Image: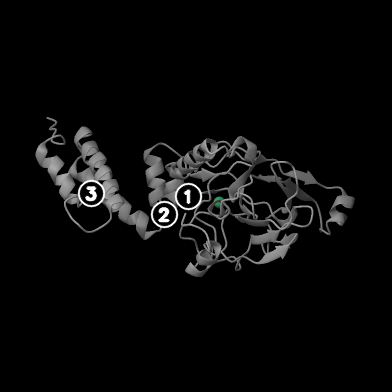
Amino acid sequence: MTVKIYDTPEVQDFLKTVAGLDQAGGTERAKQIMHRLLSDLFKLIDDFDVTQEEYWSTVSLLNALGGQTQFGLLSPGLGFDHYLDMRQDAIDAEAKRNGGTPRTIEGPLYVAGAPEAEGFARMDDGQDRDGETMWLTGQVRDVNGNPVAGAKVEIWHANSKGGYSFFDKTQSEYNLRRTIHTDSEGRYTARSIIPSGYGVPEGAPTDQVLKALGRHGERPAHIHYFISAPGHCHLTTQINLAGDPYTFDDFAFATREELVIAATRIEDPAEIAKRELEGPFSEVVFDIELDKTEAPELQVRHKRPRAKEDAQDQASQLAGTAEV
Ligand SMILES: [Fe+2]
């Protein structure tokens, strides 16, 4: 027999008490959001007749997710990151900011403070022998096609095993992470290695959630970007390399048609010599268009806790701007 108690006055009053609606302290927004969240969950428990066993195993799973700092991994897996992007796209469309390269999710693995370079940087430390040499280049332009010189292009990606430096302690500091300022023609170039895709750890709490949904936790090979320049909208995006089995089946929902880029294998000795490389390589060309804006808060990335991004960085980044 299924009982329904959600709509009773006792439960409705109880929700208000739990959410602190009858208390003077706290913040109104926290109270309203918690009241709504708990109301939705209490109703769900009633509607699905959630058992004690189901509830407490979920609590245990949440503890495991937190213990392994995997909420940042589950978040894109459950579509929250992409949903926030969809909302931001809609906000931009409403404000008539329709130009520029599309955004896509940041993911949880950015680390602030990577070495900076002008125009060109080598990103790999030469230790990953399985990595195919990658020549990654492109031009940053505004929506009218004018090159943006001095744009800050931050790039980070995985190694040939799908691991990221800082989080993968076998890699050297800031391996495959660089900040490149574009040259007078708006161009940036990096020598690196072709990254591999990766999957969420087998059997980990995130994997357990995805398995319960009949889903996999694989991402295609991809390269992350932050691009910023004065007078232009900050862009958080990434490119997915074409031809990966997961290019259009990304568990994190980061793929966008415009951001799928082919890596071109080049074996011509003249091209190899021109780039001062030792042998054949794969070239990846990603040109970026930035929309214009005068609003300071749109010219910087949104705030969120990031590795090595301390309060000082945030303070200087947001100097003179409104809180965003
Ligand atoms: Fe990634």
Q: Secondary structure at mark 1?
A: loop
Q: Position of residue 290 (x, y in %)?
A: 65, 46
The residue that appears at 21% across and 45% down in the rendered structure is: 53
Q: Position of residue 89 (x, y in %)?
A: 52, 39
Could you give the CA–CA distance between mark 1 and mark 2, rounded to whole angstroms?
Answer: 10 Å
Q: Nearer the viewer, residue 204 or 185?
A: 185
Q: Residue furthest top?
A: 1
**Some atom of ligand 1 lies within 8 Å of the CB belonging to the residue at label 3:** no
- Give above or below for 270 relative to 260: below
Q: Nearer the viewer, residue 71 or 112?
A: 112
The quarter of the picture where residue 80 lies is: top left
User: Dividing the image into 4 quarters, which one contains the N terminus?
Assistant: top left
Q: Is residue 310 left or right of residue 273?
A: left
Looking at the picture, which amino acid does disc 2 mark? Gln
The residue that appears at 21% across and 41% down in the rendered structure is: 42
Could you give the CA–CA distance between mark 2 and mark 3, rounded to whole angstroms?
Answer: 19 Å
Q: Which residue is mark 3?
A: 56
Looking at the picture, which amino acid does disc 1 mark? Val
Could you give the CA–CA distance between mark 3 and mark 1, rounded to whole angstroms?
Answer: 24 Å
- Give above or below for 57 relative to 6: below
Determine whether label 3 and label 1 are within 8 Å by CB. Answer: no
Q: Which residue is mark 2?
A: 70
Determine whether label 2 and label 3 are within 8 Å by CB. Answer: no
Classify 10 Å Cα crowding around label 3: few (below 14), some (14-19), many (20 and above): few
Determine whether label 1 and label 2 are within 8 Å by CB. Answer: yes
Q: Is residue 216 left or right of residue 293?
A: left
**Some atom of ligand 1 lies within 8 Å of the CB belonging to the residue at label 2:** no
Q: Which residue is mark 1?
A: 200
- Give above or below for 286 relative to 110: above
Looking at the picture, which amino acid does disc 3 mark? Trp
